[in-house]
Amino acid sequence: MRIRIYSYFTFFVAAVLLVTQWSVHYVDYWMVGIFVILTQAAERFSHPLRGGGTVSLAFPVGLAALLSGGTTSAMIVAAASAVTYEDIVARKPVHAIVFNISQLVISANLASNLYVAIGGHPLSASGQAGPGGLIWLLFASLAATTYIAINIALTAIYFSMLRGASLRSQLAGFGRYAKGLPLPTMLGIVIAQLVAIAGLPYLLLLLAPFLIARQTFMIYERQQHTYMDTVRSLVAALEATDPYTSGHTQRVATYARALGERMGLSEVELRRVEWAALLHDIGKIALKNETLCKPSTLTDDEYSEVKKHPQVAAAIFGEVDFLADITPLVASHHERIDGKGYPLGLVGEEIPLAARIITVADAFDAMTSCRPYRTTTSVDDAVLELQKATDGHLDPHCVKHFIGVLNEGIISPYQLKVDGESNA
């Protein structure tokens, strides 16, 4: 119910903005029509986000409409980009469609008003954008930043209500995509300038780059899925040898990615962390099953064998091109910041940040899941142990952020139970 109220409230706000700020002056409907065609083409090539929702090349088209035609043009194109043929065929909930239209209209409206307020002018209105050169680029960039910021904020509130998660966690999840803002902003500026200089027909030439970009992206995505399938097969091989680690690597990967997101890692870095976390224990495949599952304390010889598993994993990954960049992370996930870890005895920042992240996630899951040699530790007690371990074992900065991740409900150990056998 709350989410429907929120959706229709945004619709009311958008409707007020449309009615009070609609202007027929300087609106080139031929231009708006072509922008609508382009934005629909861009939406057909949208990409699903891990945190929910989608992202597409419709934003630079919407920004170009704002810079070229002003507030009314921007609102029309924004509204048009919110509904696609696929939405109708898939029978997307009405309140979701209403929200998408409304939040994009609000974003476009406020961004356009800011652009005009600081001295920018629609290109089709005056033939000039106001102050030229770098100042105009600054105005356009501020408008783009406002557009994206409002878009992210409104969407984060929606998903916070939908999932019952904290608003901060949703903002963090969607906010990381804002790091790629400069490129689509420049594309939007180029489109607007192309319209002003060369005219509307040249806009249709942009369809070809959209198609090429989509094809390139699809090839990349298929390759990444193939790689991930390989990674998961390796993990399955490990977990088949040790029933007590079932689900452990997936949980560590989930924890590590959430921690990496909170610490501001890029999407490329997050993928490295996730893959390394999934594979951090793959070297244990070389250990005897009785050692892995031994319910009592290991002997010195057995412990010496266990300590070799990071090097075993590094040797395996060193021969696989697409896993080579995670080799240092897997090899150092048992290092300690005081230099007393293994296999190399690295100290402090000599240990890669991603490895330090994985070490915290691994330690937490090891304490909160069932093992043959000890009982499960409660989440609260595990947090206390993590804090104690910052005096030499774990990176204090990583531990601090991980506790924040837990406190804010970004991840919950209770949502990751495996067959009812574990508290994590």
Image (cartoon, rainbow, N blue to C red):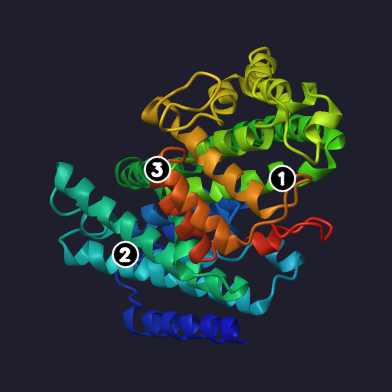
Q: In this view, does 379 lie above or below 61?
A: below
What mark, if any, has residue 111 been given in the picture?
2
Q: What element carries label 1?
A: helix
Across and down, in percent, residue 348 comes to: 38, 30
The image quarter containing residue 241 is top right
Q: In the rendered view, does 138 fall on the left or right side of 202?
A: left
The image quarter containing residue 112 is bottom left
Q: Nearer the viewer, residue 142 or 225?
A: 225
Q: Nearer the viewer, mark 1 or mark 2?
A: 1
Query: Could you tell which of marks 1 and 3 lies nearer the N-terminus?
Result: 1
Please state which amino acid type lies under the numbered disc 1.
His
Across and down, in percent, residue 207 comes to: 54, 41
Q: Residue at x 52, y 52 (%)?
A: 385
Q: Which of marks 1 and 3 is in front?
A: 3
Residue that label 3 marks: 391
> Circles 1 and 3: CB distance less than 8 Å?
no
